Image (cartoon, helix red, strand yellow):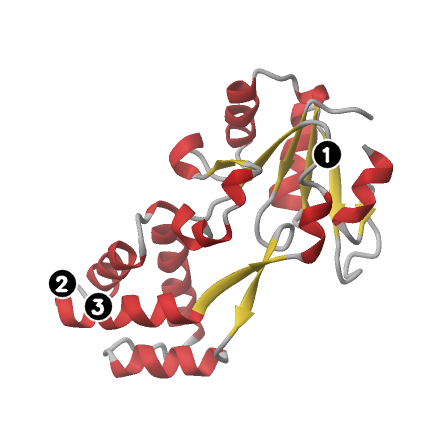
């Protein structure tokens, strides 16, 4: 298998979150701002809004302002700044050690993610990967148009492309439907039965590709 293009998912595939605070600390902070999440329904609604707004935010300040407007119907700058500073300090990501093993693979490389670029811009992944967020594709995984947008940009065919991801439903199934080779990265061996080729480390790609 000698692909012209490898598309990588981001979270769980190339990067992981550094846990600075437990979940209850986040809820306590939200409560101090007047955002009380008392029920599972409250939490789900907040999470859905959080995720949607994150896909298209420009930076933490922009995201925090939009979040407060959506959840609390307020635009208080002081509160927004507190929220922005809190997120910037506590939501941090790190690159997996084995990413360095795929940087020099002899093909083009892309990242396909729903995350806004500011979340990981400090990791300098754009030196090695062409990054595609919803701003570039206009769609979200698992919509196959998201994957098609990447193929069109590189002018390659699905059968010339490999998709690497840690989520079967969002990463691999839509890629396979288009005709891409799809490989599951399961770092903790959580998925026992799957028809997809599976690796536990990106280092294994050197033997496959």
Q: Distance between the Cα atoms at labels 2 and 1?
A: 47 Å
The mark nearer the N terminus, 2 or 3, is 2
For image coordinates 39% across by 51% down, the residue present is 118
Corner quadrant of residue 175: top right
Residue count near mark 3 (Cα–Cα under 10 Å), binned few <14, some 14–19, many ≥20: some
* Of the pair 86 and 129, the residue shown nearer to us: 129
* Of the pair 86 and 37, the residue shown nearer to us: 86
**Which residue occupies the extreme right position in the image?**
207
Number of the front mark, 2 or 1: 1
What percent of the width, then of the height, locates residue 159? 72, 20
The mark nearer the N terminus, 2 or 1, is 2
Number of the front mark, 2 or 3: 3
Q: Secondary structure at mark 2?
A: loop
What percent of the width, then of the height, locates residue 97? 69, 57
Residue count near mark 2 (Cα–Cα under 10 Å), binned few <14, some 14–19, many ≥20: some
The answer to whether 73 appears left or right of 22 in the picture is left
Q: Is residue 78 above or below residue 176?
A: below
Corner quadrant of residue 67: bottom left
Q: Distance between the Cα atoms at labels 3 and 1?
A: 42 Å
Which residue, given by chain and number where applicable, does mark 1 sit on? 105
**Mark linked to residue 141:** none
**Mark linked to residue 75:** 2
Can I make out residue 49 in this image?
Answer: yes
For image coordinates 41% across by 63% down, the residue present is 47
Which residue, given by chain and number where applicable, does mark 3 sit on? 81
For image coordinates 45% across by 53% down, the residue present is 122
What percent of the width, then of the height, locates residue 106? 72, 28
Q: Is residue 16 above or below residue 137?
A: below
Report the quarter where the N terminus lies.
top right
């Amino acid at each position: 298998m000698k692909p012209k293009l490898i598309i990588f998912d981001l979270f769980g595939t190339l990067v992981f979150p550094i846990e600075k605070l437990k979940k209850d600390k986040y809820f306590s902070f939200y409560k101090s701002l007047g955002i009380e999440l008392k029920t599972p329904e409250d939490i789900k609604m907040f999470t859905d809004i959080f995720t949607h707004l994150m896909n298209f935010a420009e930076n933490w300040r922009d995201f925090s302002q939009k979040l407060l407007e959506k959840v609390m119907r307020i635009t208080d700058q002081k509160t927004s700044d507190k929220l922005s500073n809190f997120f910037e300090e506590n939501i941090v990501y790190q690159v997996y050690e084995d990413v360095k093993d795929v940087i020099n693979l002899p093909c083009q490389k892309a990242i396909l993610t729903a995350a806004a670029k500011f979340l990981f811009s400090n990791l300098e992944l754009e030196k090695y990967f062409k990054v595609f967020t919803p701003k570039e594709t206009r769609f979200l995984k698992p919509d196959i148009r998201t994957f098609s947008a990447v193929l069109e940009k590189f002018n390659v065919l699905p059968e010339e492309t490999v998709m690497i991801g840690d989520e079967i439903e969002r990463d691999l199934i839509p890629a396979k439907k288009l005709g891409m080779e799809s490989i599951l990265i399961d770092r903790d061996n959580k998925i026992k039965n799957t028809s997809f080729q599976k690796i536990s480390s990106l280092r294994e790609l050197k033997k496959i590709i």
